[in-house]
Image (cartoon, rainbow, N blue to C red):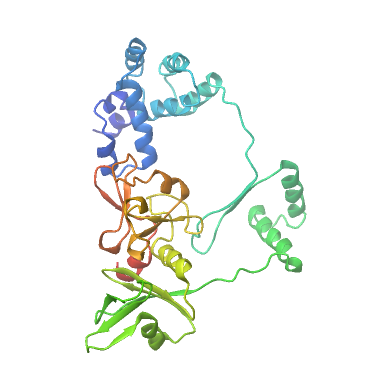
Amino acid sequence: MNFSEFAAAGVGVLADFDRDAAVAAGLSTARVRDLARVHHTYFGPTQFTRKQREALTAADGMPVDQVVLIERKLTAVGDAAERWRIRLDLVRHRGSYRALTKRINRLIHVPVSPPKPACRFSRSKAGMRTMIVTYNERDLADLEHLLRQMITSDNPAAAQMAEALFTLLRDGDSLPHAHPRPIILVPVDDHVRIHASDGDGDEVTLILTDGTTMTGAEYLRHEFGDTLEVAAFHPQHGPVNLYRTKRLANTKQKTMSKLVCPACAFPDCKATAATTQTHHIHAWAHGGMTNMDNLAELCPFHNGVNADNRNGPFGYIDNADARIHWIAPNGVEVPMTTPGAMELLFG
């Protein structure tokens, strides 16, 4: 298939679409969802069989991306008969993607709900982060007006306004500096193996090859003193424990889990560990324990859709070889998008 054929490929190429095969081929979850929606419309069961045949004929030659756009926009139309009426109009369109978008906007009237006030922060990238604020338009207009009074025309306005904003926030110590919490990731050397203590499993005894033993806390204190907070990881068993001058109990487990999963373990999810929930890989309801080898970090949405019985349509989280993976519905292992402590220490 040359590029012209690829660009002009119509809805017919999706006749034998398979969701699992698409996931295994590496398509993004959003793309798989879009294609599955188109496949269901044109080749799935429906009570509007005559209209389905008409739409399939009319859509012949329409690029798949335009068909995907139509189906995505039609999700805003609640009545099935009305969706087919609009669909039959739109699939007869022949022209640019932009022109189709304009026609869709004329035919589909979606009520616009005002966004709620919000402040969001992106992940760090090359030492920088993005803050997005949604608030009352008059208040933000006042802020923009003030910031523009503080800049010159010599340099790009956006960068100057960012500097001006933080100059305002820092004046008078109204914006205190955050106190970062440095944690050192330490691989436990090959001459040490993990052995569970006789206690509740919260502490770990390390058995050395010379026959002596010491606790994980003693080992790290011996190597690093008690100044730094140090987290130990074993190349096969994963996180050993997190030690400092006093025990952290449940907080300690959550911190270690966030080191293993610095972001939601589902691939391509943008949620960082600051907003995730600590998830039982083997469900608590099915006998899973609250131990380090059974914990991972998921955002609230993916924690909700993760299949506790491992047979759901969204796949599930596993930790083969102490590396957190998402297992797709077809069984393919997909590593985390953001590497955690195990990947950073051991590859």
Residue 41 shown left or right of residue 162 in the figure:
left
Residue, x 51% and y 21% (percent of image)? 103
**37 is higher (above) or lower (below) than 127:** above
Answer with the quarter of the image where residue 10 lies: top left
**81 is higher (above) or lower (below) than 187:** above
Q: Position of residue 186 (x, y in %)?
A: 37, 76
Q: Which quadrant of the figure contains the C terminus?
A: bottom left
Residue, x 55% and y 20% (percent of image)? 106
Is 5 or 91 nearer to us in this picture?
Answer: 91
Q: Which quadrant of the figure contains the N terminus?
A: top left
Q: Position of residue 152 (x, y in %)?
A: 73, 57
Is 328 or 139 nearer to us in this picture?
Answer: 328
Residue 22 shown left or right of residue 225 in the figure:
left
**43 is higher (above) or lower (below) than 299:** above
Answer with the quarter of the image where residue 191 lies: bottom left
**Total numbered badges shown on the rendered structure:** 0
Q: Position of residue 36 (x, y in %)?
A: 34, 31
The residue most toward the top is 50
Is 294 or 92 nearer to us in this picture?
Answer: 294
Residue 119 shown left or right of residue 232 in the figure:
right
The residue most toward the front is 199
**15 is higher (above) or lower (below) than 277:** above
Residue, x 62% and y 39% (percent of image)? 115
Res 306 seen here = yes
Res 25 seen here = no
Residue, x 31% and y 76% (percent of image)? 198
Answer with the quarter of the image where residue 255 lies: bottom left
Q: Position of residue 340 (x, y in %)?
A: 38, 63
